[in-house]
Image (spheres, coloured by chain):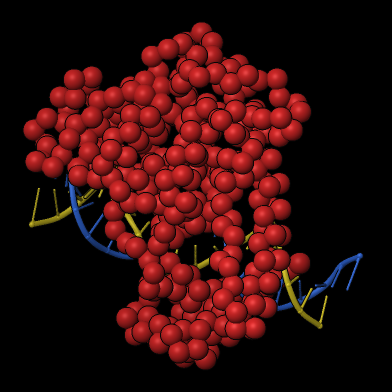
Chain colours: A red, B yellow, C blue
Amino acid sequence: MGRISDSSEKIELKKGPWTRDEDQKLCEYIEQFGHGSWRALPAKAGLERCGKSCRLRWKNYLRPDIKRGKFSVQEEKTIIRLHALLGNRWAVIASHLPKRTDNEVKNYWNTRIKKRLARMGIDPVTHKLKSLNPDGSGQSRLAANLSHMAQWETARLEAEARLVRESKRLSDLHLQLLRNATAPPPPPCLDVLRVWLATTANGSVSGSHESPTSTLTFSTSSNTIPVNGLIDGGSIIENNMVSIDNTCNGFKGKMGNSQQLFQDNITYPFEHDYIVSSVTDFVSTNHGNIAMEENEEDKSYWNDLLNLLDSPL
DNA sequence: AAACCTATCAACCGCCCCCTC
DNA sequence: AGAGGGGGCGGTTGATAGGTT
C-alpha cells in the first residue's frame, strides 16, 4: 500500500534514548488528555518524536502499571508454557502476565529462556528435543505430537477469532450500558486457554471437538530430561541444566542461604496430557491472571516442567 | 588497568491488520 | 471494493553495563 512510515517523515525527528524531560512531557500530556491519536500527540505534547516512538515509550516504559525487574519462577513458567502453545505471540503471552510488556517478555525469552532451553537440548522454536535417540527413534512420535499440536493450534485460533468477535460485540454493549449509567458486567476474558479447556474435558479430546484428521491416541508417558539448577528464593539464578555434572558440584560453593539446588527430572510441555494439565492448572489457579505465589507451586513447576527423559519415546 | 567479550534491554524498523471513507 | 491511515506486533539493532582474560 505504499504507506509512509512515521520514521520517514520529512521533519527531522529525534531518535534514540528518551530524556527525563521528554518522559515528563509525555506523561503529563497523557495524564491530562489521554493519548488520543498517537500520530498527533507529539506536536500537541511538544515532543520532537514520531507518534510511534511516543506510543512505544509509554507502553513499554512510562505506563504506571508496569512491573519491572526480575521475572519470578511463576512468570517464567507461564512464558514457557504459553510459548509452547502459542509460539512467538508475545503480546498474547504478555497479556497473561500482569504488568509485564510484550517487549519485556520477548527480551526475556530471547536473552534467557531461549538459551537455557538450547542448553537443555530443546529447540526453543519447536519445543522439541534436538537430540533424540541416536538411531532417530522417537522422531515419528514427536512428529505426530507436533502434528497434533498444529491441529489444536488451528482449532484454537478459530476459537480465538470467534471470541474476538464476541468480545467486540459485548464491548459495544458494555459501552452502551455505560452510557445508560448502568453498571455493566465485566467484558469476557479473552482467555484462549479456557476455550481449550472447554474442549478438553478430563484432559482428553472429546466428542465433536476431536480433530477429524487425527488418529493419535494420547499417551500418559512424558518427555523428560535431566536437569540441575539453582533456585534463589523464588527466582532461578542459574540452571546450566545438563551441562553441569550430575552431582551438582558445579554449583557448590556459590550458594547463599536462600539458595537451593535442584536436580530433577523435567517433564517438558510437549505431550498433549501435559499441556492440558498445565493449562488446567494455569487457568484454575489464576482465573486468567497469574498468581505470584512461589512455594509449592514453584517446586511442582520444576518437578513437572523439568522431569527426565528416563523413558524411551 | 586495559582490552575484549557477553548479556541485557530500550528503541527502532518494517510489515500486517483493521477500520474508515 | 479498495485505497489509505493508524495502531499493533515481532524481529532486530545498538548502547552500555558487567564480567573475564
Q: Residue A109, percent across and down?
A: 42, 46
Numbered marks: total: 0
Q: Residue A285, percent across and down?
A: 42, 45
Residue at the image position 22 percent from the left and 21 percent from the top:
A245
Vertical arrangement, residue A279 with respect to residue A243, above or below: below
> Looking at the image, which residue sits at the far front?
A182
Could one spot residue A124 in this view of the protein? Answer: no
Q: Quadrant of residue A113?
A: top left
Residue at the image position 15 percent from the left and 39 percent from the top:
A259
In the image, A215 versus A123, the foreground residue is A215
Vertical arrangement, residue A138 with respect to residue A200, above or below: above
Quadrant in which the N terminus of chain A is drawn: bottom right
Q: Quadrant of residue A302?
A: top left
Vertical arrangement, residue A170 with respect to residue A131, above or below: below
- Looking at the image, residue A252 sits to the left or right of residue A43; the answer is left
Q: Residue A40, percent across and down?
A: 58, 85
Could one spot residue A40 in this view of the protein? Answer: yes
In the image, A103 versus A33, the foreground residue is A33
Vertical arrangement, residue A217 with respect to residue A134, above or below: below
Residue at the image position 37 percent from the left and 73 percent from the top:
A64
Residue at the image position 68 percent from the left and 33 percent from the top:
A151
Q: Residue A141, percent across and down?
A: 58, 17
Q: Quadrant of residue A250?
A: top left
In the image, A137 versus A278, the foreground residue is A278
